[in-house]
Image (cartoon, rainbow, N blue to C red):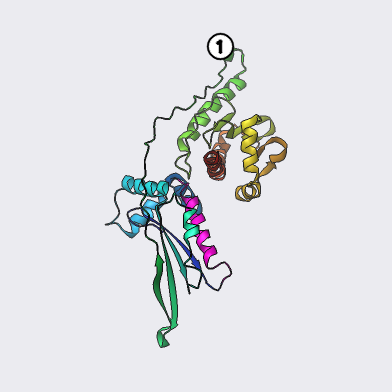
Amino acid sequence: MITPNGEIAIVETKLWRNSEARRAVIAQILDYAKELANWTYDDLQREINRKLKKKGNTLYKMAKEIHPDLIPNESDFVDSVSRNLSRGKFLLLIAGDGIREGAYSIAEFLTNAGHLNFSFAMVELNIFSAGEIGKLVLPKTIVKTVEIQKLTVEIPDGLVISNVNVEDLSNSSNDKQLSPEKSKERQFYPNFWTELSRELTFDDPGQPLPNPAQAQNLFLYPGKTKKAWISAYFMKSKKRVGVYFRTASDNEGREIFNFLDDYKDEIKEELGDDIIWTWDESNDVGIRFYCEDVLAKKNRYDIKEFFKEQLNQFVNVFRPRLKKFESDK
């Protein structure tokens, strides 16, 4: 849950007769908090958009609809949520139908998340039958921790200097030696990629848009490294276009591949049944779209829609995992 001021609450509900109740559930909610503290606002926005199948700053829009008079402006809301995520400043609530013995001894669990500035509370929901009106639920706060004040030193983000991707362009004088058909094909790709780049949007607002390419392949990078990439491509000779993810074959690429390999079952499921899985053979995974003439104007719209949908899906699947890989290094 989230307040109009961008404060975040995580609620774990349990029946306390459940075998996972008592102290185990406390460890569980702390794991949720520690994981969420690694997220940025972009991560949160991406997952909300994936779940609700929407675009844009959905979290802010939903909060604004419910509390139009209380919500700050969009930039303040985003900044507040971002600060609370980075500091691990959450309200952690465990709600159950009864708090039993042993649940108060939580010190060892709380020390495992000492870098988070959370407040912790247990809420007991006593349920009574109340005659003709049905069931009556009376919440009662059982225990709440005293928040430990910590000194937080914030280092502002500095300038980020990224590598420039220089396309290997052929000498334009060679065009004079090309047939009219080949010359037309060569002009097709930069025009198409430029048009696609203008229309392309991602659920993850932190994903940079690709630079328009000059040839058959368009590349984008879901992580900070250039050793793992997503490519959209044309293959005219085989009457298909496609999207694939691949890692480099050097040491860094293999390190990324080995990390992602632990998630391959999840990746398979998230990418869907149409995926072509060549993970173990060539370190990649992709999807294809077939049509008789991939350069024909009549197929342009369908191909663009395919690319927009699949590039967004591949970013959703691989970007959060690459960010986890980078944060774990």
Magenta highlight: main SS: helix
Query: At 57% across and 38% down in the image, what residue appears?
Result: 303
Please state the horizontal and vertical placement of residue 294, each as a whole percent of the image.
61, 34
Query: At 61% across and 32% down in the image, what residue appears?
Result: 252
Q: Amino acid at mark 1?
A: Ser
What is the tally of numbered marks visible in this picture?
1
Is residue 209 left or right of 73 when viewed as pictured? right
Q: Residues within 10 Å of mark 1 (few under 14, many from 20)?
A: few
Does residue 153 sit above or below 195 in this rendering?
below
Quarter of the image for residue 245 reads top right
Q: Most extreme residue toward the right, as rendered? A: 281
**Is residue 313 within the magenta segment?**
no
Does residue 164 sit above or below 293 in this rendering?
above
Please state the horizontal and vertical placement of residue 75, each as a whole percent of the image.
33, 45
Please state the horizontal and vertical placement of residue 182, each as a whole percent of the image.
61, 21
Image quarter in which the N terminus is found: bottom left
Q: Most extreme residue toward the bottom, as rendered? A: 131
Under circle 1, the secondary element is: helix
Please state the horizontal and vertical placement of residue 328, each as a whole percent of the image.
54, 41
Q: In this picture, which residue range is highlighted in magenta?
A: 18-39
Query: At 44% across and 44% down in the image, what residue appears?
Result: 42
Residue 86: in sight, yes or no? yes
Which residue is label 1 attached to? 173
Residue 287: in sight, yes or no? no
